[in-house]
Image: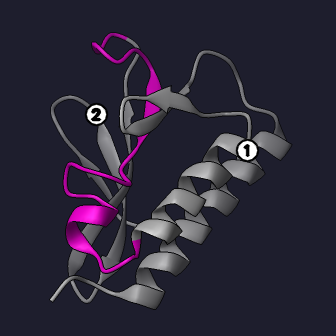
Amino acid sequence: MPIHWGTKGFSLNVDVKGTHVAVYFGYPPHSVYKQSIYTALQGRGGISAKTSVPETVVRVLLSQAESTGLFRRAGRELKCPVDRAFSEDETALLISWCEKVDAAIREHGLKE
């Protein structure tokens, strides 16, 4: 999954035929968002904006992220504070969720 480094943080992306779709954005400790990960499911060049993933599937992905216990609501997206070391199980949950997002994007493709 490609990572794009920006002036405020980074994004983890899915590459679909050369088009990168953000899965989440990561921010450093001194940013306005503090050290955290924000999902990119409903805005800012993410899944809803760039793909044909149905809203029902986006809601399932949001629910699955929340069920990890790592994310909490932050407006239309979810926030995962990175204020401690994650356990191996938590890291595996985060990676598994990213893989589910990747699979949904690949299944439904880009918007025409």
Question: Disc 1 and disc 2: Cα gap in Å?
Answer: 25 Å
| Image position, residue 49 (x, y; %) | 21, 64
Mark closer to the observer (1, 2): 1
- Whether residues under marks 1 and 2 lie with C-beta atoms below 8 angstroms apart, the answer is no
Q: Given the image, on which type of amino acid does mark 2 rest?
A: Gly
The residue drawn where x is 22% and y is 70% is 50
Label 1 sits on residue: 67
Q: Given the image, on which type of amino acid does mark 1 rest?
A: Ser
Q: Which mark is residue 9?
A: 2
| Image position, residue 105 (x, y; %) | 42, 78
Q: How is the image coloured?
A: one colour
Magenta stretch bounds: 30-54
Identify the element where label 1 is drawn: helix
Please give left or right for residue 87 compared with residue 32 in the image: right
The residue drawn where x is 47% and y is 63% is 58
Please say whether residue 43 is one of the residues in the magenta stretch.
yes
Q: Main secondary structure of the magenta part?
A: loop
Q: Quadrant of residue 46?
A: bottom left
Quarter placement of the C terminus: bottom left
Quarter placement of the N terminus: bottom left
| Image position, residue 87 (x, y; %) | 81, 34
| Image position, residue 29 (x, y; %) | 41, 14
Please give left or right for residue 51 compared with residue 57 in the image: left
The residue drawn where x is 47% and y is 89% is 107
Count of marks placed on residues: 2
Please give left or right for residue 40 compared with residue 91 in the image: left
Residue with the most extreme front position: 56
Question: Which is more toward the observer, 48 or 6?
Answer: 48
